[in-house]
Image (spheres, rainbow, N blue to C red):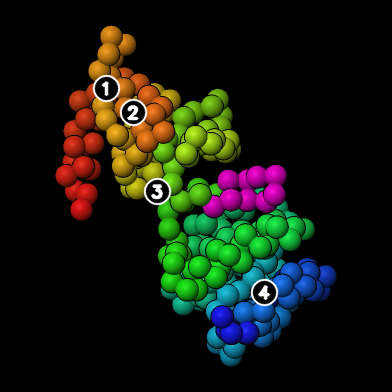
């Protein structure tokens, strides 16, 4: 890959934060910083003037904030967006605004490197922006987990536990909230406390305990009696629609 293959714009009202992003980007010579902005108005002007490939966009800026920049510009006309913020509670709004990633300041080198890998894959055409996903806070920042990689989700009091390949993550969202988004991506309710990605189901297995969905890693998820017919019918339709 040649040097300075892609142009980056850094937007943050704090000079130290802009300098920090510049320093982190120095480890990625394929990206050249072509401009810095202190507020949303400068960002809007720079997008037209500089045509960056990626913008590191602070959420909270004076006047026009990061979300307003996207609203005024429209998501379709934005370059790849990586949000920057000191607060993790903007994560869901950032994803809904079709950001590719979301970084909580101060950003570690490891977390920034993971983001740059995602940005590079996206710019090379390997990952579509706005893919349905769940934003998961972690000890290192946040993880954006595509719904297609989630096997099933279960209720955990006021939280939800997301399972993917035998690993689990706890998120501060109710199962009902997640189901509203996940249903459009091929999930179905198995019982009162669980939803399942239909494409992860290997078989429906009957036993003395009732019907259960067996997913790819061998986990059996019970199907409640009143949902059995609907779940089985939805699964058949999903299987028939697969290429």
Q: Are marks 3 and 2 in contact (CB under 8 Å)?
A: no
The nearer-to-camera label among 3 and 2 is: 2
Foreground: disc 3 or disc 1: 1
Assign a secondary structure to mark 2: strand
Residue range highlighted in magenta: 136-144
The image quarter containing residue 85 is: bottom right
- Marks 1/4 in contact by CB < 8 Å: the verdict is no
Q: Mark 3 = which residue?
A: 148
Mark sitting on residue 205: 1
Q: In which quarter of the image is the N terminus?
A: bottom right
**Quarter of image, res 187:** top left
Residue 181, numbered circle: none
Task: Nearest to the eye among marks 3 and 4: give it.
Answer: 4
The image shows a total of numbered marks equal to 4
- Find the distance from the CA under tag 4 to the CA under tag 2: 43 Å
Q: Is the magenta stretch mostly helix, strand or loop?
A: strand
Compare marks 1 and 4 and give the one earlier in the sequence: 4
**Element at label 3:** helix
Q: How crowded is mark 3: few (under 14 residues within 10 Å), some or many (20 or more)?
A: some
- In percent of width and height, residue 175 lies at 46, 34
Q: Taking 61 as reference, is 159 above or below it? A: above
Above or below for 191 versus 114? above
* Residue farthest bottom in this picture: 49
Side of 70 where 197 appears, left or right:
left
Q: Distance between the residues labelled 1 and 2?
A: 7 Å
User: Between residues 29 and 211, which one lies in front from this camera angle?
Assistant: 29
Kindly state the secondary structure of the residue where label 1 is placed: strand
Query: Residue at (19%, 33%) from the top-left corner?
Result: 233
Q: Name the residue under label 2.
A: 214
Disc 4 target residue: 28
């Amino acid at each position: 890959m040649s040097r300075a293959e892609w142009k980056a714009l850094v937007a943050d009202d704090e000079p130290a934060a802009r300098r920090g992003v510049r320093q982190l980007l120095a480890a990625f010579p394929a990206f050249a910083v072509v401009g810095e902005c202190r507020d949303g108005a400068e960002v809007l002007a720079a997008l037209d003037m500089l045509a960056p490939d990626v913008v590191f966009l602070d959420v909270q800026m004076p006047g026009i904030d990061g979300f307003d920049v996207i609203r005024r510009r429209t998501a379709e006309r934005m370059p790849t967006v990586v949000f920057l913020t000191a607060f993790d509670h903007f994560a869901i709004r950032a994803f809904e605004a079709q950001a590719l990633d979301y970084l909580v300041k101060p950003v570690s080198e490891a977390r920034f490197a993971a983001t740059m890998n995602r940005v590079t894959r996206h710019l090379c055409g390997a990952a579509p922006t706005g893919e349905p996903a769940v934003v998961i806070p972690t000890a290192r920042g946040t993880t954006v987990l595509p719904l297609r990689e989630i096997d099933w989700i279960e209720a955990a009091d006021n939280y939800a536990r997301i399972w993917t390949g035998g690993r689990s993550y706890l998120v501060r969202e109710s199962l009902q909230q997640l189901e509203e988004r996940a249903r459009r991506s091929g999930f179905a309710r198995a019982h009162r406390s669980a939803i399942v990605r239909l494409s992860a189901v290997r078989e429906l297995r009957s036993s003395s305990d009732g019907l259960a969905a067996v997913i790819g890693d061998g986990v059996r998820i019970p199907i409640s009696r009143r949902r059995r017919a609907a779940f089985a019918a939805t699964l058949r339709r999903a299987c028939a629609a697969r290429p």
